[in-house]
Amino acid sequence: MAVYMSASRQRRRTIAIAVAALVIGVGLGIVLGRVTANSVSDAVDASRSRGRDVAAALRTLPLEYEQARAGSGGETNAGIDDAVARVATMARAAFRKAPWLGPGDRGEVTSAVDAVGQAAHRSASLAEFKTAVDRAATTVEDVFGVSSTAAA
């Protein structure tokens, strides 16, 4: 036996089901979005980690530079240039993933890394090269808000 339902009652029922489905869908979307989203602190932590990696890569350069100057360890001036270029690439990648760091910060780090490259090109003394590297590493650490990884 069929039950007669007026057209207006069918419309109200259809609208009520649609509204209920919309509310449930939005609620689930919000819950899933909050559960799966990276938090701001996750992004900042990842940025600090990348900054730490750049500073650590910089701090390895004096050993490579010393070996290149002495002609030992298979290091050459081209190898130092490549190592400085890798550090610059790491820094650019770190900045791409940290858009909250502005052009001033980028300029500071770029200038500091360039100073390391220039010291290598002009065959600076090991002490001068170490000073340029320490300045660059400290700049990176300051910009990315990480503590020094240098031995005290």
Image (spheres, rainbow, N blue to C red):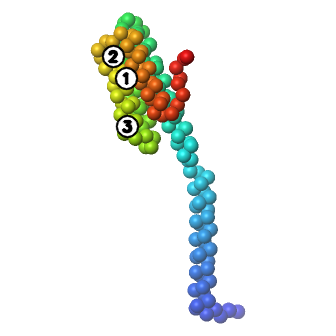
Q: Is residue 98 above or below residue 134?
A: below
Residue 84 pos. (x, y %): 37, 23
The residue beneath circle 3 is 104
The label on residue 24 is none
* Chain-order first, disc 1 or disc 3: 1
At label 3, counting other C-alpha atoms closer than 10 Å, the crowd grade (few under 14, some 14-19, many 20 or more) is: few
Q: Quadrant of residue 64?
A: top left
At label 1, counting other C-alpha atoms closer than 10 Å, the crowd grade (few under 14, some 14-19, many 20 or more) is: many
Q: Are marks 1 and 3 in contact (CB under 8 Å)?
A: no
Q: Amino acid at mark 1?
A: Val
Q: Amino acid at mark 3?
A: Gly
Q: Nearer the viewer, residue 16 or 60?
A: 60
Say which element carries label 3: helix
Q: Nearer the viewer, residue 18 or 59?
A: 59
Q: Amino acid at mark 2?
A: Ala
Q: Nearer the viewer, residue 79 or 10?
A: 79
The residue beneath circle 2 is 120
Say which element carries label 1: helix
Instruction: Give the residue drawn at x 50%, y 37%.
Output: 47
Q: Which residue of the protein is positioned furthest toward the left in this rendering?
A: 122
Q: Are marks 2 and 1 in contact (CB under 8 Å)?
A: yes
Does residue 22 appear left or right of residue 89 in this picture?
A: right
Distance between mark 3 and mark 2 Cα atoms? 25 Å
Residue 53 pos. (x, y %): 49, 28
Does residue 27 appear left or right of residue 95 in this picture?
A: right
Q: Which is closer to the viewer, label 1 or label 3?
A: 3
